[in-house]
Amino acid sequence: MNRGQERSAMRIVVSGIGTGGHYFPAVITANELQKRKCDVVFLVRKGYQEEFIAKKYGLRTFNIRSRAFYGKSHIGKLLFILTLFHSILRLHSLVRNAIGIAFGGFGAVALNISCIMHRRAFYIFEPNRVPGRATRFFATAARRVFLGMPPAHALNGNLLVTGIPIRPEFKRMVRPSVRKMSKGTSHILFYGGSQGATRLNDLALEIAKTMPRQWRLTIITGSRDQKRVSSQGRTNTKVIPFTESPWREISEADIVVSRAGALAAYEIVACHRKVIFVPFPFAVDRHQYHNASYFAEIGDAGVCEERDITAARLLAIIREMLKKRKVRKTRLIMDAEQRIADCVMGDVNEKK
C-alpha cells in the first residue's frame, strides 16, 4: 500500500480491553477489517494480556489507561474518573477522523465518549445475553449494537445479532461428528476459565476419587490454583494451568464442565461437545446463567447452578450424558467477524 492509499484508508479504532471474552473477538474482527484494507488501531492497556494478544495477531496497538468502576471502592472509582480523562485526551487526535468499535465494558468507555465528542460513528459489540452496564448506557448513541446472542431482556438501540467471532483455529479443527472413543474410555474436561475456577477444580478433584478407572480427566485450573490441584491429582488426571489452544482440549473431550462466559461457552458449543454449564454465581446481573440457559435451549448442554451442585450429583449427570452417544448438532453463526465488517463497511460506503 502506498502513502496515498494509507491516507485514504478508513481508520477504525477497536477497543478490546478486558478479559479473553473481550479481546479475542476484538482481534479476530480487527484482522477481518485489516483484510479489507482498513487502517486498524487496537486499544490496549500497556503490559496487559490484550496487548500481547493484539501484537501476536499482527495488530498496531495504542495504549490507554483503563480501570473498572462498578464494585470498586471510592478510591477505585476516583481512579476510574482520572484515568478516563487521561484516556480521552490521548484519544483526541486518534479518533477525530475514525470510526470506533468497542468490545467490552469499562475498557470501552473512553473510546465511546471520544467518538461522541468528535461526532464520529461508533459501534458496540456485546457478547452476553444480558448486556453490561456500559453497553446499556451507550446503546442508543451507537450506530449499531452487535450482539453475540439474542438478548434475554429488551435493549434500546439499533441491534443486530451477529454471533461471536471465534479464533480461526476453532473453525479449522471443529468437526460436527462425535469423537471416536476407545471402548469404555471417556474424557472429561473441567474448564474453569478466569472467573470462579476454584469451585470447579474442587468438584473435579472429588469426582476423580470415585470415577471409573477408564475415565480420563483434564482440569484447566487457572494459574493461581494449579499447584494445589496438581498436588492432589491422580494418575488418570491431567492438570494444566492455562492453554493458549483450548480448541485442542475441547475437541478431545466427550463432556466439558465449564463456567458460562459468553466466548468460552460459544466455543464449546461450536465444537459440538456435550457440556454441563455451572454459571459463576457472582457474575453481574447473572449474565452467565442466561448465557448457559440459551445454549441449553439450542445445544446439547445442561445447566447446574452452583448452589445446587455437589460432586455426586455432577458425577450422575456426567454418567447420564455419556449414555447418549449422539451429540445434538447446534447451528451457531460462525462468520460473526465478517458480518460485523460487512455492516461497518456498508455504512462507510453508504456515507461516501
Image (cartoon, grey):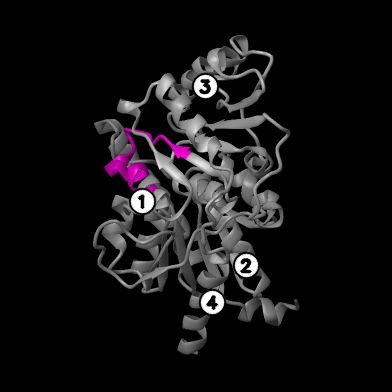
Element carrying mark 3: helix
Residue plotted at (34% across, 38% down): 283
Write the residue at 24% across / 62% down: 154
Q: Which residue lies under the disc numbered 2?
A: 32
Q: Is residue 352 above or below residue 275?
A: below
Secondary structure type for disc 2: helix
According to the picture, the residue beneath numbered tag 1 turns out to be 85
The image's mark for residue 342 is 4
Residue under circle 3? Answer: 204
Q: Are marks 4 and 1 in contact (CB under 8 Å)?
A: no
Q: Left or right: where does residue 168 sit relative to residue 78?
A: right
Q: What separation in Å lies between label 2 and label 1 (alpha carbons)?
A: 31 Å
Q: Amino acid at mark 4?
A: Asp
Q: Which residues are magenta?
A: 276-291
Label 2 vs label 4: CA separation?
10 Å
| Residue under the image location 69 percent in, 49 percent down | 56
Q: To which quarter of the image does residue 256 belong?
A: top right
Dot 3 alpha-carbon crowd within 10 angstroms: few under 14, some 14 to 19, many 20 or more: many
Q: Secondary structure at mark 1?
A: helix
Pointer 2 and pointer 4: residues touching (CB < 8 Å)? Answer: no
Q: Which image quadrant: the N terminus?
A: bottom right
